[in-house]
Image (cartoon, helix red, strand yellow):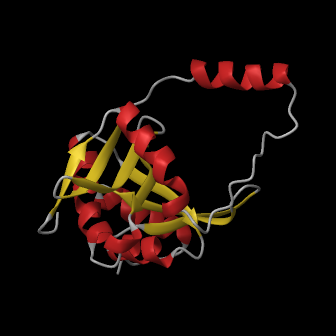
Amino acid sequence: MIDGYALRELTTEEFYAVYRERESLYFTSSTRDDIDAGLQDDVRERIVARRAAYPQADNFQWGIYSGDEIIGWTFAQQSDHDTLLMRNTAIDPAHRGRGLYSALLPIVIEHARVGGYQRIQSTHLAANNAVIVPKLKAGFIITGLNVNEKFGLLVTLTYFLTKSRHQLALNRIGFLNDR
């Protein structure tokens, strides 16, 4: 990473403990409406059972450290046989703007390449330039837009780990020549 910063693997329990503690600090622009409000207990139980039955896919959660202090994280998981989904990355406000996210991307890309993935995807608030711009600079391309009832307008970005898939995606989007 960048001098003075390091990545360390977190257990699932460590990750969710830090996530719960800092979620409101890191995601101040996200609405946290309870979309399950008003559901009856039997419906909530079915939701919990369905989530528990969902197959466990390959995943990782890394803490971003400044010395011994955790100042952020990244969490990714397999979403299908070819795709690594970057689910969530967050950095303390005091450490933003230092290039940490840009430095993290090649590490995640190499991890996906070694793992045999064909693509990396992520979804972001459409106005989240602090994430979208570094990803576009790293070679991700816009592959979708979606309006989500919880978060609003979202943009999906994809990084293709082989040149042929990258070029095919550009052709399908309408670009006949790669940059």
Q: Note whether 115 is above or below 93 in the view shown.
A: above
State which quadrant residue 84 falls in. Answer: top left
Dividing the image into 4 quarters, which one contains the N terminus? bottom left
Image coordinates of residue 82 in percent, x first then y, are: 40, 41
What residue do we see at 74% from left, 53% from top?
Answer: 33
Q: Is residue 107 left or right of residue 164?
A: left
Q: Is residue 43 visible?
A: yes
Q: Note whether 120 is above or below 1 in the view shown.
A: above
What residue do we see at 83% from left, 19% from top?
Answer: 42
What residue do we see at 39% from left, 47% from top?
Answer: 75
Who is closer to the viewer here, 15 or 55? 15
Dividing the image into 4 quarters, which one contains the C terminus? bottom left
Count the labels in the image: 0
Image coordinates of residue 99 in percent, x first then y, are: 27, 75
Q: Is residue 86 left or right of residue 123?
A: left
Q: Is residue 18 left or right of residue 38?
A: left
Q: Note whether 1 is above or below 178 in the view shown.
A: above
What residue do we see at 83% from left, 22% from top?
Answer: 41
Who is closer to the viewer here, 152 or 164? 152
Q: Is residue 176 visible?
A: no
State which quadrant residue 12 falls in. Answer: top left
Image coordinates of residue 119 in percent, x first then y, are: 38, 51
Who is closer to the viewer here, 85 or 150? 150
Q: Is residue 160 left or right of residue 65?
A: right
Who is closer to the viewer here, 22 or 128? 22
